[in-house]
Image (cartoon, rainbow, N blue to C red):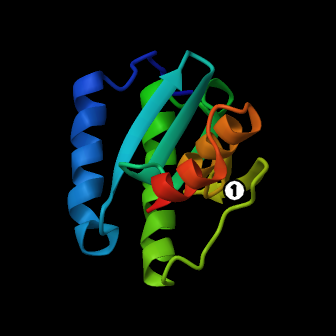
């Protein structure tokens, strides 16, 4: 059995990976950009790659989780495997004119002999925020229309 370490992705590595995703998919992004969040411990890794615009009217978090220890992966290797698969997913997403979707609840996948779960759902967080303000009586209909222009 290979010796595992508990090495994790460092913030500088995550920033560089985010920059690489933005450059790689630049022709398809328009006003959108990527962000990456990684959370891991010795037994598992969670990765969220979010494609979004500044207003968050397009907000697409793709979340992945993998059991690292049981598959003899370090947390860093588990996170990198998820990031590799999510990158492949976004290649397909852009190739299919954004008509490729993940399940909105956790679903199992296999990549390079490893098992993990993914989910994703496109949201319009800006509209959701305005709806909450309207329902709370903090803005009126005209203010919503003005904010969406």
Nearer to us in this view, 13 or 101:
101
Residue 32 as seen in the image, left or right of residue 132? left
Residue 126 as seen in the image, left or right of residue 132? left
98, above or below 78, in the image: below
- Can residue 14 be seen? yes
Q: Position of residue 28 (x, y in %)?
A: 32, 74
Residue 91 as seen in the image, left or right of residue 1? left
Nearer to us in this view, 146 or 127:
146
Farthest-out residue, bottom: 96
Q: Position of residue 140 (x, y in %)?
A: 64, 45
Viewport quadrant of the C terminus: bottom left
- Can residue 57 be seen? no
Q: Residue at x 60, y 40 (%)?
A: 129
**Element on which disc 1 rests:** strand
Q: Position of residue 69 (x, y in %)?
A: 62, 24
Residue 87 as seen in the image, left or right of residue 28? right
Q: Residue at x 44, y 17 (%)?
A: 5
Q: Residue at x 32, y 67 (%)?
A: 29
17, above or below 148, in the image: above
- Dot 1: few (<14), some (14–19), or many (≥20) neighbours within 10 Å? few
Nearer to us in this view, 35 or 12:
35
Viewport quadrant of the N terminus: top right
Circle 1 sits on which residue? 109
How many discs appear?
1
Q: Position of residue 17 (x, y in %)?
A: 28, 43
Q: Residue at x 40, y 39 (%)?
A: 36
């Amino acid at each position: 059995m290979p010796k595992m370490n508990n090495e994790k992705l460092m913030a500088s590595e995550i920033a560089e990976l985010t920059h690489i995703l933005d450059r790689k998919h630049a022709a398809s992004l328009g006003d959108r950009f990527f962000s990456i969040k990684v959370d891991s411990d010795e037994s598992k890794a969670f990765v969220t790659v979010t494609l979004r615009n500044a207003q968050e009217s397009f907000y697409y978090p793709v979340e992945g989780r993998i059991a690292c220890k049981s598959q003899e992966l370090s947390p860093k290797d588990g996170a990198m495997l998820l990031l590799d698969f999510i990158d492949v997913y976004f290649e397909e997403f852009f190739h299919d004119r954004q008509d490729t979707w993940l399940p909105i609840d956790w679903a199992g996948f296999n990549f390079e002999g490893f098992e993990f779960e993914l989910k994703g759902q496109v949201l319009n967080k800006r509209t959701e925020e305005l709806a909450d303000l309207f329902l709370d009586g903090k803005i009126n209909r005209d203010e919503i229309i003005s904010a969406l222009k």
